[in-house]
Image (cartoon, grey):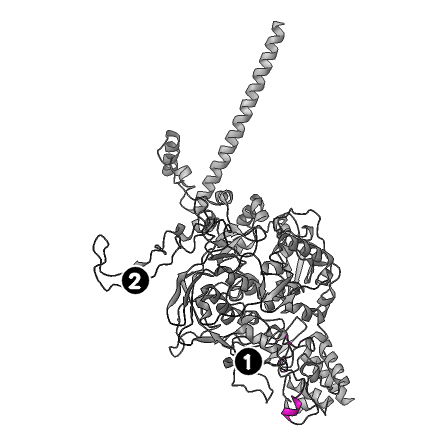
Amino acid sequence: MHTKWKDSLLRGLVMVGLLSIVPAALASQAAASPKSGCLNCHHGIEPIRAPGSPMMRKIMAMGAAAGDPAGCVICHGGNPRATTKRAAHAGTFYADPGSPWINEKTCGICHRTEVRAQWASLMMTEAGKIHGTAWGAGLQGYEHIWGNYDVSNPADPHERLGTKAYQLYKAKLKALEPKVFPDRLSALPPAPSATGVTKDPRTAAFTYIRQECERCHLAVRGRQTRGDYRGMGCSACHIPYSNEGLYEGSDPTIPKDQPGHLLIHSIQATRQAKVTVHGHTYSGVPVETCTTCHDRGKRIGVSFEGLMESAYTSPWGATGQAQPKLHTKRYISMKGDIHNTKYGMICQDCHTSEDIHGDGFLAGSTLGSVEIECTDCHGTPQKDPWELPLGYGDEFGRKRGTKPRGVARTLLPFQKTGTVYPPEDGYLLSARGNPLGNVVRRGNEVIVHTAGGKDLELKPLKLLARTGGLSLNARVAMVSIGRHIDTMECYSCHAQWAPQCYGCHVKIDYSKDAEAYDWVAAGHDRLRPGHRAEARDPAPEALMIPGHVSEQRSYLRWEDPALGINGEGRVTPLIPGCQVVYTIVGPDGKTLVRNKIYRTPPGTEGAGPKGQLSINMAPVQPHTNGHARSCESCHASPKAAGYGIDGGRATGSWDAGRIVDLAAPDGTILAAHAKTQIEPIPGLVADWSRVVSERGTQLQTVGDHWTLSRPLNQAERGYLDRRGLCLGCHQEIPKASLAVSVLHHIAEVTGQLPSTPQRHANLLRKILLTAAWAQVGGMVVVVLIAAVLVMLFIRRRKRGA
């Protein structure tokens, strides 16, 4: 009885977060399992879940049935009765139970649905990333045909995870965009040999993909450097790793001075999964776990935190050392996304299980997998979220429905394995028809239950509009000008900044026996007999392939991005996706191609028989939301319209190159040994930031996945461009006409000339109202005069009769 009381008290303290050191809990487990050899060695290790939690009770019950009441073997396998490490880890021992190569036997015992879906998820196939790189090398059109592994959709369409409404929605979307939703993907072709690349230099892109792009897919542990430490499969997200990769728990068998280890031996997941580190208890998957992978490409992870890649090593550290590299980069501090910085939200508070784990079917782009829209929680000034039809904000060119989506009363079965919140007035639905398990309706408000433990009360836009909670700017942008909210993504205005790395200069050198690691082959290596349970990636010497990749940029910016149209057919920010310029050095040291921009297939992307330059501007949700950008930042900006930074006039000619040395006044270079300072990039006739010309000629690709993605068209740029608007008034002010001259003189004498933007705006509003009422009044007077004349005419005719 005493032992049971002590055990219950211990579990209770852990559950309420009052214990800072959890190894004592496992001491209790060890007492319950005196024959467990695991805890004889790992006696200080943290419990994978809090003792007393439903998951831990289930693990221990299953463990007891397997002869190990501590439950270690349920996840790790091995022999708990062994007395030596060699014997304990023999047989089916899994050092990383989350590895996708074996997790059907571990995580899949309880989470079969997620494990089944993983192989079709974008985090495993990387189909979008592969397609984008192949697109930039001229190797692929719109078809999505390659992934990291051979994988096919299930034969039964009803195996797609989600509600019936969601399944129907995705089926229609697949019919609309079949090239983005393939039925199968083939394994990525091998990288070329050093001599093979001379036959077709474009195939160097396969070297680029394998050495650089694919280190993040979940079938490998990835680049084990600062900020990139993680496990595989489920462990990549659900096991905490610090940026330094050091173990900071109490297991005496795990070295604390060797990087590459988990932070502590606990699962991080939903609100109920409490993790305690150095006396601090938290829940949820930290943002920095996500940035282990989401730090390049669209960079949404680091942007969400408020980090922007920098070319500089400053500011200096305490001893004058350079800023340490994180994800092999250095950063400057920017404004983080307001969801994170003000409200403490993390990635999983918005992104659903289907967004992250996938729904079990293939997609070639994040836009194909992500089911949420801003309006799913915020609604519009005219309709609450539950009044919007399914598909709102996610139209993909289709006619918008009218039937209100309502709310859900129950969750999907797999959603119930995490924290389940009371439905109150119903769970909100995503744009595609799945219940949002952590977001509920309470009257006219929305409650967002965060994984970190907050219950945020959100007033939808309709409620704010009705109660005067919208600012003047918001009312004008979203109510007065309905086209904004009907045709634009919310983040087109609310993104405070966006990372813009213009020009990706990639050099792949096959000379001097240059080699690097093949991350795709590292995954395939585990298909060999006896290798599935390996926790570490294969040794470098085993999987080296010819070629060495170097990357550089032309320049970096972050100010208000350009605008274009995304795959859903909505106005969205654009950032450089992969503006790749290839330089390929052959095995003999001779350059095969130099500063080469490949082209897309003939007739694509607004181009003719030669195809379009394959440098790409990508539609993006920057994940930097906050106060909306100003009206002028779009309507008075050539960049916003797609014409480039300062209209593309600031930079010199990219295709001509530049020699800098002593020169005569006529430009003739005088020195015989003068060198080219800036090499030319053939075919790049406009600046990297210039998407479309003023005449409507498309200058580079916009997106490489969806048929609707494109630059703004002529009509849209016309609506947007309000540059020179001042000339409409000021060509008359102050003395171009007698009436204006008199009014200007009176205003000057009486001190009424507008001296601030607010006074200027008030004056314009007064002029607008005066002009409007004058014209309406004039029309009324004309109508009255006409009516009087008609009456007089009729009366005269009567008298004449």
- Residue closer to the observer: 238 or 342: 238
The residue indicated by pointer 1 is 538
Q: Is residue 20 magenta?
A: no
Residue 222: quadrant of the picture? bottom right
Q: Is residue 87 magenta?
A: yes
Horizontal and vertical percent position of residue 715: 51, 42
Which of the numbered marks, if any, corresponds to residue 153?
none
Horizontal and vertical percent position of residue 569: 57, 50
Residue lying at 56% horizontally and 76% vertically, measured from the top left: 522
Horizontal and vertical percent position of residue 705: 56, 57
Mark 1 or mark 2, earlier in chain: 1
Q: Which of the image's four quarters has the C terminus? A: top right
Which of the numbered marks, if any, corresponds to residue 676?
2
User: In this rendering, does residue 459 appear at all?
Assistant: no
Residue at the top extreme? 801
Q: Over which residues does the magenta segment extend?
A: 84-104
- Residue closer to the observer: 48 or 141: 141
Residue at the bottom extreme? 83
Q: Amino acid at mark 2?
A: Thr
Q: Is residue 776 above or below residue 556?
A: above
Q: Contact, CB < 8 Å: mark 1 with mark 2?
A: no
Horizontal and vertical percent position of residue 471: 55, 50
Lateral position of residue 76 relative to residue 588, left or right? right
